[in-house]
């Protein structure tokens, strides 16, 4: 196994970042990118300098979820560093902005591409870098955690997939790396209709997970057509509706990272 590289030699590109937050899930499609993007824009709304690194090279979501004017990353030919693109002052780096088609790559290549994008980007001075992790807890995720000195991790899951074993895997990976899991987001938890709240997948399992693994915070995120629509429109929900219920949940999450 690769030894942690940040023990003593932090990559140049990451040296002026105060907090690196990993948003992680064991499975795809649970809303990890939705949480990462809305968390980042919430922190930016609170006045922080923020960047988002979309580490999912197989299915990058960032280019769909935010619409920067400049959709291609530029390389500085002299320093060979990458200039992030920007939307509403948040710096963005994604393989989806690299101008190549969806690549077929083996694991070690993926790790290489991710590390290069992450560490050669000119992030500058940031209060928070939010990393949208690739789903799972394999080698790619582990390498990424060893390159970036993570401050905290947020685990995203959905009620029906809230198998202990899944969250346990995530928590175990981060605890091995001495990264605190500060919150679990249980996404698509409920919806409101006719003045009633419905929990289509049942409820209660979230608090059990939080107790069992000693995670300090649990957030329930509702199923919201606007959350899905905003993901496709390029304007995050917390930006489109900053006073809404979803924005309030993200403000609480923002405070605890
Ligand atoms: P992941 O990053 O885990 O693969 P995404 O964030 O891309 O998941 O979400 C998958 C799909 O579900 C997207 O189309 C997204 O807009 C939608 N989605 C995520 N969370 C919600 C929610 N709470 N309510 C409605 N749609 C959601």
Image: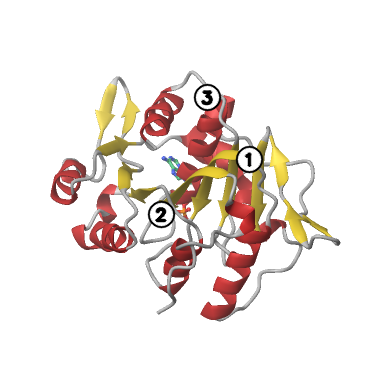
Q: Is residue 33 at all visible to an observer of this figure?
A: yes
Circle 2 or circle 1, nearest the eye: 1
Q: Quadrant of residue 254?
A: top left
The answer for how far apart the CA atoms under marks 2 and 3 are is 23 Å
| CB under 8 Å between discs 2 and 1 | no
Q: Does the residue tagged 1 have its C-beta within 8 Å of any atom of ligand 1? A: no
Q: Is residue 63 at all visible to an observer of this figure?
A: no
Which SS class for mark 3? loop
Could you tell me residue 37's position as x and y percent?
53, 42
How packed mark 3 is, by other alpha carbons closer than 10 Å (few <14, some 14-19, many 20 or more), is few
* Disc 3: which residue: 46
Name the image quarter holding the N terminus.
bottom left
What scheme was used to colour the molecule? secondary structure
On the rendered structure, is 236 left or right of 158? right
Q: Quadrant of residue 70?
A: top right
Name the image quarter holding the C terminus.
top left
Which residue sits at x=45%, y=43%?
35
Considering depth in this image, is 150 or 33 the residue closer to the camera?
150
* Disc 2: which residue: 24
Considering depth in this image, is 8 or 144 the residue closer to the camera?
8
- Count of numbered circles in the view: 3
The answer for how far apart the CA atoms under marks 1 and 3 are is 16 Å
* Disc 1: which residue: 125
């Amino acid at each position: 196994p690769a030894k942690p590289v940040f023990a003593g030699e932090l990559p140049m590109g990451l040296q002026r970042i105060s907090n690196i937050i990993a948003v992680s899930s064991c499975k795809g499609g649970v809303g990890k990118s939705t949480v990462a993007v809305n968390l980042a824009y919430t922190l930016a709304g609170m006045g922080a300098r923020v960047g988002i690194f979309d580490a999912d090279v197989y299915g990058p979501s960032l280019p769909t979820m935010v619409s920067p004017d400049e959709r291609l990353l530029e390389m500085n030919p002299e320093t060979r560093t990458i200039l992030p693109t920007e939307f509403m002052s948040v710096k963005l780096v994604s393989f989806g902005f690299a101008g190549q088609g969806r690549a077929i790559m083996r694991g070690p290549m993926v790790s290489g591409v991710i590390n290069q994008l992450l560490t050669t980007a000119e992030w500058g001075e940031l209060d928070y870098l939010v990393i949208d992790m690739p789903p799972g807890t394999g080698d790619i995720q582990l390498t990424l955690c060893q390159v970036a000195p993570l401050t905290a991790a947020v685990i995203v899951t959905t009620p029906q997939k809230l198998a202990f074993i899944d969250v346990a895997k995530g928590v175990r990976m981060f605890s091995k790396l001495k990264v605190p899991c500060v919150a679990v987001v249980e996404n698509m938890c409920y919806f409101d209709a006719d003045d009633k709240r419905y929990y289509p997948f049942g409820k209660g399992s979230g608090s059990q997970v939080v107790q069992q693994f000693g995670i300090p915070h649990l957030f329930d995120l509702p199923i919201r057509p606007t959350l899905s629509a905003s993901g496709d429109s390029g304007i995050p929900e917390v930006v489109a509706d900053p006073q809404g219920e979803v924005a309030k949940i993200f403000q609480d999450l923002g405070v605890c990272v």
